[in-house]
Image (tube, coloured by chain):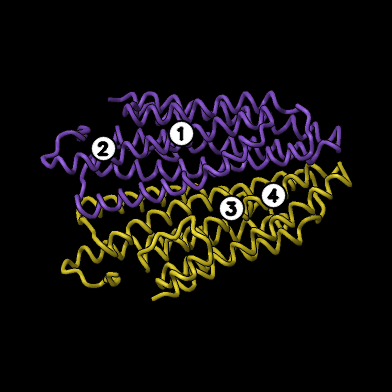
Chain colours: A purple, B yellow
Amino acid sequence: MDKLQFDKHTSAQYNAELEEARKNLMQMGGLVEQQVDDAVRALMEMDTSLAQRVIETDTTVNEMELDIDEECTRILARRHPAASDLRFIIAVSRAVTDLERMGDEAAKVARHTLELADTGSGPQGYVELRHIGVEVRHMVQHSLDAFARLDADSALDVMQQDKSVDLEYGTAIRSLITTMMEDPRSISRALNVMWSLRSLERIGDHARNIAESVIYLVKGKDVRHKKLEHVEAQVKRD
Amino acid sequence: MDKLQFDKHTSAQYNAELEEARKNLMQMGGLVEQQVDDAVRALMEMDTSLAQRVIETDTTVNEMELDIDEECTRILARRHPAASDLRFIIAVSRAVTDLERMGDEAAKVARHTLELADTGSGPQGYVELRHIGVEVRHMVQHSLDAFARLDADSALDVMQQDKSVDLEYGTAIRSLITTMMEDPRSISRALNVMWSLRSLERIGDHARNIAESVIYLVKGKDVRHKKLEHVEAQVKRD
């Protein structure tokens, strides 16, 4: 496999362009991480003005997606990247898509928060929300760290976390269904909690996707749709 | 703007590679279209063996995603496409991601069908499901046709359809919530219908994304996150 060699180009300008793309991705990542953090906090504390801010941030996140994608296209057109540089551009471009979707899901959580605030809601289902919220925030953070440090082992950790979030999500949904059946007056509220949980679970999926992009970038293997044990073997091999 | 010029390369081999990517995308599109079609039909007719087949097809769809993406990466590395060729590769690669997600959502609908069949369900909410199902199937079909014919106007139609599906989806969800409140015994069933509706609505979103990729390919404008009126102006301009 070719080594990662982002610093070895004869053209200083080319290096600067790749570095710029990396920097912008990380900046977008930081913003989305904050958005997810704020969305969970707004929901927990029924902070409607924070929820409002999460929704508004989405526009900036969308613009960043377009800018970074355009930058990647320009590099492809002018620099004809090969080997690890090409994988880098592809990984950045995939990660940007995932970050944008995370932003969408965070905004959805914020919208459900506003609906919950409207109805004046109790704390049922919040233990699960808080727990999954914290885990998913960590996943987002760790997937971005793994990208920044080109660390396939950390990326693998994120994939493992996703599995545990999926299990907890299933448990939380089943317990909410029980609540709804026992107390039909809670239905509307429980549905808002349910959709929020679903969005958090989706954010976890996107963090997992970013982790897969990191492994693609570092190891040169496309591990999407592969079983975790298989990916583990790939990452540990070399 | 540069003209689309897929047939003008001096290298016959390069032409063949682009044509192969196009053909494979269309083949994957056909399979996903069938999968969506089958998922809706299985749900309507409570056909569990058809639902099972939809779930199994997902593996093939996933493999096609990896194959076509690898093909695109190879073309980027070897041929250094520029202008409309580069946009073509980017559009194919984005469309493939959307098709794969559609396949996932179709499989989710199929899983909910199996759960509904288990509980022995009535027909409530099915009018909306059937209606949205038919519309979404058309969107998928039309987005792929627009890609095949490089037709930005048809792509714009798909974007308009998405808006109407989103509205109908909102109405259907509200009516299901009413049903759940009136008859708490229907909760579990209604939730399966609700998740199925959500998946169909997401399939519509992905068809819209493919339509946006077609406009990017044909017009050279990235219209993601733009208001429909803005996109309309872009498409009609030249």
Residue B122, horizontal then vertical, whole percent: 82, 53
Single out the mark in the foreground, 1 or 3: 3
Label 3 sits on a secondary structure element that is helix
Q: Which residue is mark 2?
A: A19
Label 2 sits on a secondary structure element that is helix
Extreme residue toward the right, this view = B182
The residue located at (40%, 35%) in the rendering is A212
Q: Earlier in the sequence, mark 4 or mark 3?
A: 4
Label 4 sits on a secondary structure element that is helix
Single out the mark in the foreground, 2 or 4: 2
Determine the CA span between mark 1 and mark 3.
25 Å
Single out the mark in the foreground, 2 or 1: 2
Describe residue B73's horizontal placement relative to residue A223 as left or right. Answer: left
Label 1 sits on a secondary structure element that is loop
Mark 2 and mark 4 in contact? Answer it, CB < 8 Å.
Answer: no
Determine the CA span between mark 2 and mark 4.
48 Å
Q: Is the residue B16 above or below the residue B93 in the image? A: below
Quarter holding the C terminus of chain B?
bottom left
Q: Which residue is mark 4?
A: B113
Determine the CA span between mark 4 and mark 3.
17 Å
Amino acid type at circle 1 is: Lys
The residue located at (59%, 62%) in the rendering is B162
Describe residue A208's horizontal placement relative to residue B17 as left or right. Answer: right
Q: Which residue is mark 3?
A: B202
Amino acid type at circle 3 is: Arg
Q: Are marks 4 and 3 on the same chain?
A: yes
Q: Which residue is mark 1?
A: A227
Mark 4 and mark 3 in contact? Answer it, CB < 8 Å.
Answer: no
